[in-house]
């Protein structure tokens, strides 16, 4: 059975990471406030930085590779 990993942008501008085999049903549960569990896959993604989540959303795997390197620190803009 296929499963979906998904990232929702919340009203407070944070990201929620989830995983489900029934994407439309789960989205409805989130809209209704009825979902409160998580899976092993979600635990890994939940530990990602905001930058990594923002890279994976559009499929920027090159940036994700750079962000995943040990010791990566984003440069500060002037």
Image: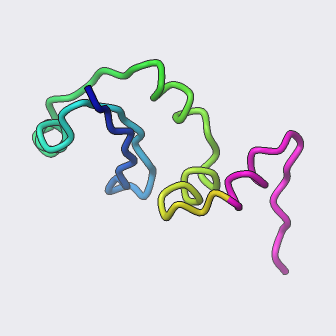
Q: Residue at x 53, y 35 (%)?
A: 45
**Residue at (81% x, 76% y) in the render:** 77
Q: Residue at x 36, y 35 (%)?
A: 18
Does 73 sit left or right of 27 as displayed? right
Q: Position of residue 57 (x, y in %)?
A: 48, 58
Q: Residue at x 63, y 57 (%)?
A: 61
- In the figure, is residue 65 to the left or right of 25? right
Q: Is residue 6 left or right of residue 73?
A: left
- In this view, 74 is above or below 2: below
Image location (x, y in percent) of residue 14:
45, 51
- The answer to which of 25 and 11 lies nearer the viewer is 25
The image shows a total of numbered marks equal to: 0
Between residue 1 and residue 29, name the one nearer to us.
Answer: 1
In which quadrant is the C terminus drawn?
A: bottom right
Outermost front residue: 1
- Residue most extreme to the right: 71
Q: Quadrant of the N terminus?
A: top left
Query: In this view of the protein, which residue sits in the foreground, 76 or 64?
Result: 64
| Dominant secondary structure, magenta | loop
Q: Which residues are magenta?
A: 62-78
Q: Nearer the viewer, residue 75 or 26?
A: 26
């Amino acid at each position: 059975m296929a499963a979906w990993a998904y990232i929702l942008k919340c009203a407070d501008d944070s990201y929620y990471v989830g995983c489900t085999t029934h994407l439309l049903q789960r989205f409805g549960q989130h809209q209704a406030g009825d979902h409160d569990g998580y899976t092993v896959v979600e635990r890994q993604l939940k530990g990602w930085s905001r930058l990594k989540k923002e890279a994976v959303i559009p499929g920027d795997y090159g940036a994700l590779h750079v962000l995943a390197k040990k010791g990566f620190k984003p440069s500060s803009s002037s």
